[in-house]
Amino acid sequence: MQKFFSNRKLIIVMIAIIISMGLMAYSVTVRNNQKTPPLVQQFGNDVVGVLDHVVAVPTNGIKDGFTSVGTLINTYQENAQLKTQVDDLAQTKIQNQTLQHENKELKKQLKLNKTLTDYSQISAAVLTRSPASWQNYVIINRGQINGIKKDMPVMAGSGLIGRVVEVNKTNSKVQLISTDSQTSNRFAAEITTKNGGTVNGVISGYNGRTRQITMTQLNSNAKVAKGDTVETSGLGGLTPRGLFIGKVNLIKHDDYGLALSVGIEPATNLNNFTVVTVINRQIKGD
Amino acid sequence: MRSKIQIWVPVLLFGLMLFDGSLSTIFTSHFYNYPDVMISRLVLLGLVLVSFFLPDMKHLLLWAFIIGLFYDSFYTGILGVYTFLFPLIVYLTRQIRVYFTPTAIAIGAIYLIELTILESFVYGMNRFMGLTTATLANFIPDVLGPTLLLNLVYFVILYFPLRQLLLKLGGTTV
């Protein structure tokens, strides 16, 4: 026991703990306030990111290969199903195009240049996932030089999966919507009800047991029904309006009985995506 | 001979760190099968085995510190967690290695104990910073249990290959 707790060692341990606490406090402040980590840390992350290609590219390739073989088996069935959907889709697309055109014209007449629904997209591939599960981070291969900024929302497939929390020069970290961190930024969302109205609320967490996103602070007499669609409302920050989140699956009153709390079935499988789209809102917030 | 260790051991540890991330990406739906979460800790296996089989490796504490710093910066963005836990694990292993004959069973047991210490510290720090709301009653069955299981499998598969590799690097023939 003497070996463990000699005076000199105790002092070293104390100093290490103090430095560790200091570094942690510093990192948390940087994350909460500034847009990017300090240049040295960014450089380190970029170097690791580049080196990671040596490991990540082959392994991700293997994964994609296995997935392709796996999906090959039910391709025939899927094809038949999709064919029936395609006819529908063509009509919707044309309609969408016409509406978009009309919308543009009307906006021009109103002298509205950009609204909350305008955004551009930046495609990125998933480089690696943080094994430290407490963070729920995914690291993507696009950074500052590609125009990514902190707090941009990120989509995969048809649904929202999270937001950018840290940007380096050539890679950035995305915090998934499935986090239960108290300090992460939240999405403002709205539910479109059956009679055409909207109900506003906030995405406040993720229930691991039911695998549903939790949305709270909804007006308690709102007429929300199972199957209603949930999308971002574009209020606050850098999120545009109309990013699909999921469908309402469970409706209950929150712990205090004052507001509604809703469980949302995510539109995308939060554990299975290799390509993401970072959303850049055209109208500037704040 | 010594310079060979000095170069290849850090490369090995760094590679294991990157493989942690890649394995987590490939097996995302298995590792993060909520509520059960398995955390891949290949780099810890590397650190423990290096401290056991290459006792005369110089600056291992320093390398553990550097690897920890990169780990923090690249994977979590919160400096100061793994930065100090990795050297602590190395230090602990070096302290207790003299009391055990380096058999697979003894090293495996020590590895699991140190993994438990590491996970508990990491959980405690994240809880302290408010980065998770999971309670201790959630942490032990949902995270610690599956993590120990996964890393035990890693140990069983990788113990002999890694041991041979390290002994070869250290210049001892088996």
Image (cartoon, rainbow, N blue to C red):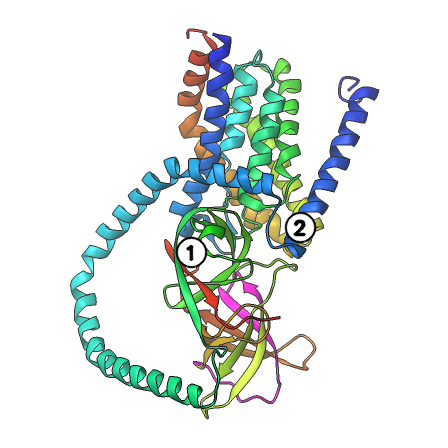
**Is residue A152 at least partly visible in the picture?**
yes
Amino acid type, label 1: Asn
Residue A273, can we see it? no
As helix, strand or loop, the secondary structure at mark 1 comes to loop
Q: Nearer the viewer, mark 2 or mark 1?
A: 2
**Quadrant of the image containing the C terminus of chain A:** bottom right
Against A235, is A47 above or below? above
Where is residue A122? Give x, y as percent.
40, 60
The image's mark for residue A271 is 1
- Chain under numbered label 2: A
> Measuring 48% from the left and 37% from the top, which residue is drawn there?
A48
Q: Which residue is mark 2?
A: A30
Q: Locate residue B131, reporting x and y percent.
A: 64, 53
Is residue A225 rendered magenta in the image?
yes
Q: Both on one chain, marks 2 and 1?
A: yes
Q: Residue at x 45, y 48 (%)?
A: B31
Chain at numbered mark 1:
A
Distance Cα–Cα, label 2 vs label 1: 28 Å
Residue in front for this viewpoint, B174 or A75: A75
Q: Start and end of the magenta stretch?
A: A204-227
Q: Which of the 4 image quadrants contains residue A205?
A: bottom right
Residue type at numbered disc 2: Val
Which of the two discs, 2 and 1, labels the residue nearer the N terminus?
Answer: 2
Q: Nearer the viewer, residue A123 or A59?
A: A123
| Residue A212: % across, % down | 50, 67
In the rendered image of this protein, does residue A202 appear above or below residue B45?
Answer: below
